[in-house]
Image (cartoon, coloured by chain):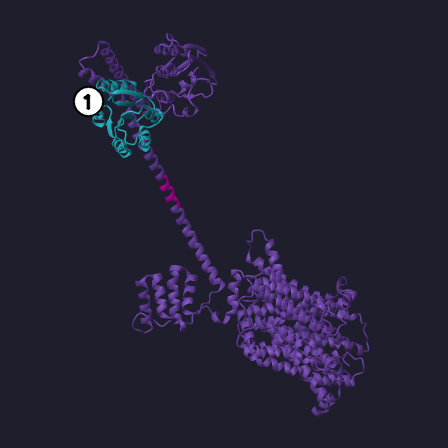
Amino acid sequence: MERTVLVIEDEPNIIEAISFILSRDGWRVVTHSNGVDAVDAVASRRPDLVILDVMLPGRSGFDILRDLRAEEGTAALPVLMLTARGQTQDRELAQSLGASRFMAKPFSNAEVLEAANALVAS
Amino acid sequence: MPSLNLLIGVCLAYVALLFLVAFGAERAAFRGRGAWLRSPWVYTLSLSIYCTAWTFYGAVGYAARSGMEYLTIYIGPTLVMIGWFWAVRKLVRIGRSQNITSIADLISSRYGKSNLLGVLVTLLAVIGTTPYIALQLQSVTLSVASFSLADATVRPLSDQNSTAFWVAAGLAFFTVLFGTRNLDANERHHGVVMAIAVEAVVKLVALMAVGVFVVWGIGGGVSETLARIDASRLGDWQIQPDRWLALTGLSAAAFLCLPRMFQVLVVENEEEGHLRTASWAFPAYLLLMSLFVVPIAVTGLDLLPEGSNPDLFVLSLPLAEGQNGLALLSFIGGFSSATSMVIVASIALSTMVSNHIVMPIWLSRQVGGAMVSGDVRYVVITARRLSIIGVLALGYLYYRVSGGSSALAAIGLISFSGVAQFLPALIGGLFWRGANRIGALAGLVVGGGLWLWCLFLPSFGPDMILPGAVMVDGPFGIGWLRPYALFGIQGLDPLVHGVLWSLLLNTGVFVVTCLLTFPSPMERLQGAQFVNVFDHSGATRGWSGAMAQSEDLMIMAQRILGARDAQELFRIAAEDQGLQGYLPEPTPDFLRRLERALSGSVGAATAHAMIGQITGGANVSVEDLLAVADETAQIMEHSSQLEAQSAELERTARQLRAANEKLTALSVQKDAFLSQISHELRTPMTSIRAFSEIMRDTDTLEPQEKVKYAGIIHGEAVRLTRLLDDLLDLSVLENGQVRMNVSSGPLRAVLDHAISATGADRGAMRLTLRGALDADLRTDRDRLAQVFINLIANAQKYCDAKEQELRISARDMDGILIVDFIDNGSGVAAEEQDLIFEKFSRVGHQQAGGAGLGLAICREIMVRLGGSITYLPGQGGAAFRVTLPASDAMAAQ
């Protein structure tokens, strides 16, 4: 069974890096690059995992996470949050909003891969 | 028969005697001698001005016309002095403790010092008294005439007017001389009072002498006289109960309300104790005055020819019997009665007129109100003197107008009922704390109005003032408004009718209005002072400590002075009194000492009021309260200073709060800035790390993949470097540490440099330049070029038109160089135009690669160069305007 990851990120280079890492491991990678309609994208793509950036054009990653957790269909969806700000209060906020995992940029490729596989069993 | 010349001579001699008496009394009082001046007998005799010429001559006439009814005039005051002694005493106490100068002053003071009431009472008093003065002039004139009728050298009757005139003028002179020596109306007129006392004796002796002559000289003894009385018509007169009641009440009211009676009874009172003597001696005097009235009347009716004026029996009987000396004495007695009344009445009225009418008008015309005291003194004295002359002139005028025809008694009673209108307000004010100003005004207006309509105006006789038709049919034919049959009540005696209606409605309106309205604080205060005058008016401001509680005083003193000081004060005082412990007897001496100690802390007036409250002698006078108010004002001022200080503190606190808020905001901005920088640094580093790990860990990379990923790493490294450069640049610019390298050159050169640096001259974007491109610049041209480069690069990056186009135009406007950069893209959204110059405000386009510091740096540079950079809305595309001072202005910097 092929696993699908939706990467919601606005930096093209970072999208490319994550895509490379995960697709090499057998993930099907789909991407979305703005915050405004990210929740709709999740609903239509129905991924097994969401990798979510915090600072997105149009809408904050935290708001998107809150919406996802409020929806019945996505309430339990594994969400890996990435942020370039990396402060403690961001980590706490992410946890309180129900992020499955939280990672600061720059990340290690192995860590991202390990986290994705831990969140969604093959 | 004494000649007229003799008569005038005797009059002048008598007047000269009065002058001497008055002058002597004044001198004695001035030198502080003359305890006899302050005798209760003098006071009692001065009260005899109640007995005017009306009583002297008129009582006999009254008896001859209406029988025993004349007695009511004596019964009223007797009842007041004996039965209502305590009320009179209260009146005198109030008059003394409040420094009352007249009945107008009393009523005005009682009702919150209302001058309107003072004016009203004064006017009513003047109107009511004028006929009475005319009456006295008439009696003197008639008595002179009765001599001249018998005189061989008969004078024309018209000379009566000149007699009245000279009498009035003489009285005015005497009154001005002795009535206005002292400014303070409350200072007693010793000379005048003494002269009146002498006159009182003279008129009593004269009347008694005539009476004795009539009973024993003509009648032949007491029993014969009694028989003559029995046989006369006088016994046939029916007593009319309504008239008796009305007249007794009226004379009682007048005794208290007549301005002249108030003057001698209250204002001229030396000692409250004198009242005790007067309370029996004055009724006795009245008894003596009335003793021989009936015998004289009966004898006169018997012996004198039909048609003789009974008002002059006292004079004409001795004349008819050839007793010239006795007639002369009788004449002097009548003269005394008339003059004493006129003198005191005009003093009383002049005080009222000057205090309540002239002075308020004069004071209101003084601009600024600041004046020399001597100035006021002169004005007051002049006002009094003119008032006296005015009052006498009015009396004379009334005498001339009324023609001197009416019976004496009728005029007297009308005058009585006029001043009796003061009674409800007076008695209410003395005994009822609920009485108030509005009520007093309403009662006085109603009562005074009815008196004018029902009694005063008709007294002139039909067609004099009121047309006869009004008397018969009522005004405008309204029957129930007829002066003698008000509201359709007919058949009453006109006097009883008028008195009944005026006093009834006066009292009713007064009471009802008082119940419906509320007194002002000043009225409440004055009301309490008047009604409870005995509770708290000691003769002086000292303390009678009888009721004082030492413990209470101690508690209060501790509260104010502190426990230790208070105990020390009390202990020493107790020691001085030879007592053990801390509680001295509350002697007046100790209370004064305590008051002094307290006043050091809380002010004199407050201290006095506080002790007063505890000792029970709570004499809180208006002065006390005003003093308290003054102290309170000082405290208020002090507290307003404190308030100002606290406002200052408040202001400082507010400034601190604002500064704190600003710092907090700055801290928040700093956090946001750091967070932004963190994001801007971490983002390229994330790409660099991710791709370098990929290249390190992946052996199977295609060569073109390797090149691509190495290119990404390189590009992100460059981006990092640029970001750090921009941050440093901005930091330097913001801190003002940047050095400007000013050089001269044309605008075109700077633009060319920027265009070639951005490669715009080689790219697809179409460039147009026009305007004042050759304008000379004197500025840091490298920095300016940096701004231009930024703007051109932005256009290259963000212009979303299919065929990019950038128009650059320059013009010189009043020494300011303006350079506009306008592209043909969709521009910046209106809501973002304010944000684009902020740091990291990279709006919309993420992919363009900038960190969002470019325009922030441009703004800083332009500020340093003395110019500006702004966004121009509404130009079609993105439009920026750069302004610079022209070269000479810049050079001046």
Using the image, determine if residue B655 lies above or below residue B23.
above
Chain letter of disc 1 in the image = A
Q: Which hue is chain B drawn in?
A: purple
Is B186 on the left-hand or right-hand side of B449?
left
Q: Is residue B648 magenta?
A: yes
Which residue in the rendered view is the most extreme toward the front?
A: A1
Seen at 34% across and 67% down, the residue is: B554
User: Among all residues in the image, which is located at the extreme top?
Assistant: B762
Q: Is residue B108 something one can see in this rendering?
A: no
Residue A61 x %, y %: 31, 28
- Residue B265, percent across and down? 58, 73
Chain for colour cyan: A
Tag 1: Cα neighbours inside 10 Å, few (<14), some, or many (≥20)? some
Determine the image quadrant of residue B275. bottom right
Q: Is residue B578 left or right of residue B424?
A: left
Location of the N terminus of chain B (image quadrant): bottom right
- Of B834 and B584, nearer the camera is B834
Using the rendered view, name the quadrant where residue B792 is placed. Answer: top left
Residue ID for mark 1: A110
**Residue B413 visible (yes or no):** yes
Residue stretch in magenta: B647-656
Q: Secondary structure at mark 1?
A: helix
